[in-house]
Image (cartoon, rainbow, N blue to C red):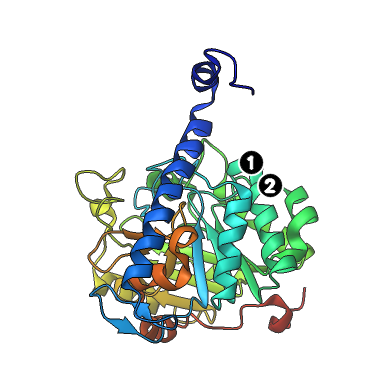
Amino acid sequence: MSTNRPGGRDLYIRSAHPEQIQVHLWFCIRTLCNLWSSVFLNVRRPSDDSTILPDGKAEQTATVPTSVNYHFTRKCNYKCGFCFHTAKTSFVLPLEEAKRGLELLKDAGMEKINFSGGEPFLHEKGDFLGKLVQFCKQDLQLPSVSIVSNGSMIQERWFQKYGDYLDILAISCDSFNEDTNQLIGRAQGKKSHIENLYKIRGWCAQYKVAFKINTVVNTFNVDEDMQENINKLDPVRWKVFQCLLIDGENAGEEALREAERFVISDLQFQDFLERHSSVTCLVPESNEKMRNSYLILDEYMRFLDCREGRKDPSKSVLDVGVREAILFSGFDEKMFLRRGGKYVWSKADMKLEW
């Protein structure tokens, strides 16, 4: 829209969609931050090969972002009471900027990207997500591209268009009792989350996408026996998480969720694991294992440091690069390896019988 005529710019601002204005302001702020960062880093950088640590000292090496979780949207159509990445903003990067950030991560050593949210299939009805998945597999040639979703927005046509580019699809399922899912908030209206889970399992087999299940153990499902359904669905991995509190997300005054009533003890979590010990694909993750062992990018492509029980953001990789931003991620690489974060994650190497 032209803004050269008198009042044109004011007219544009008044008529622009709020999300357009938000993106425009974000670009303006990021441009100023870029200018300042370039001056600041040029003054403080000891040498071309060194990295500035948070305490101002120089180090020769930085963490390699082998596996990255990109929460590109916070919006979701479910209201899970324990959610620890809530809809605090509606911001989503423009597609080309997201691609640029993913390419920077690949150049820094990324081998696996996991797209999450919020609900990643919600934005542009999954087409935005599909384009990122295709870009990462086809253009960046990443060994592994995966998604975590609640499954409610997935259509078969998405698999038809993008299934070839996806290695793993993880669907969150906390109970095989519909009433329990309603209590947790893992539901939308009266739609059956469980029926949808089985339908998506069939599509994964049909379109050759490895199927995975994520479960958060909490006060509402801690006594449930899920063995029969898990064995029937036969996922490549069943990730079982202990309900985790994050200040500002699902705990504290500024949080959008109050997850305290969902929290279970370590002993209760262990009892759940023992009850399901015969399930060979089970991968347990206690609070200790989970808190700092993930490289998490938010909607602005900032690494989130959870060491203090909250999510403290770094500068965006789009502004300062991966090498600088990752120093503020709080990432515990040893725990990442201990919890089995590195596994056979390319469907080409899984040798599955579809």
**Residue 212 found in image quarter:** bottom right
Q: CA distance from mark 2 to mark 1?
A: 6 Å
Instruction: Say whether residue 205 is left or right of residue 3.
Output: right
Disc assigned to residue 127: 2
Rendered residue at 26%/80% (across/down): 57
Q: Secondary structure at mark 1?
A: helix
Crowd tier of the residue under label 1, counting other residues whose Cα lies within 10 Å: few below 14, some 14–19, many 20 or above: few
Q: Position of residue 272 (x, y in %)?
A: 36, 72
Rendered residue at 33%/69% (across/down): 43
Disc assigned to residue 124: 1
Q: Residue furthest left?
A: 253
Circle 2/circle 1 CB separation < 8 Å: yes
Where is 289 relative to 113, above or below?
Answer: below
Where is 76 relative to 55, above or below?
Answer: above
Please state which amino acid type lies under the numbered disc 1: Glu
- Viewer-side residue, 296 vs 16: 16
Q: Position of residue 81 (x, y in %)?
A: 35, 48
Q: Secondary structure at mark 2?
A: helix
Position of the N terminus, as image quadrant, is: top right
**Residue 229 found in image quarter:** bottom right
Instruction: Say whether residue 210 is left or right of residue 11.
Output: right
- Viewer-side residue, 243 vs 230: 243
Q: Is residue 221 visible?
A: no
Q: Position of residue 221 (x, y in %)?
A: 38, 59
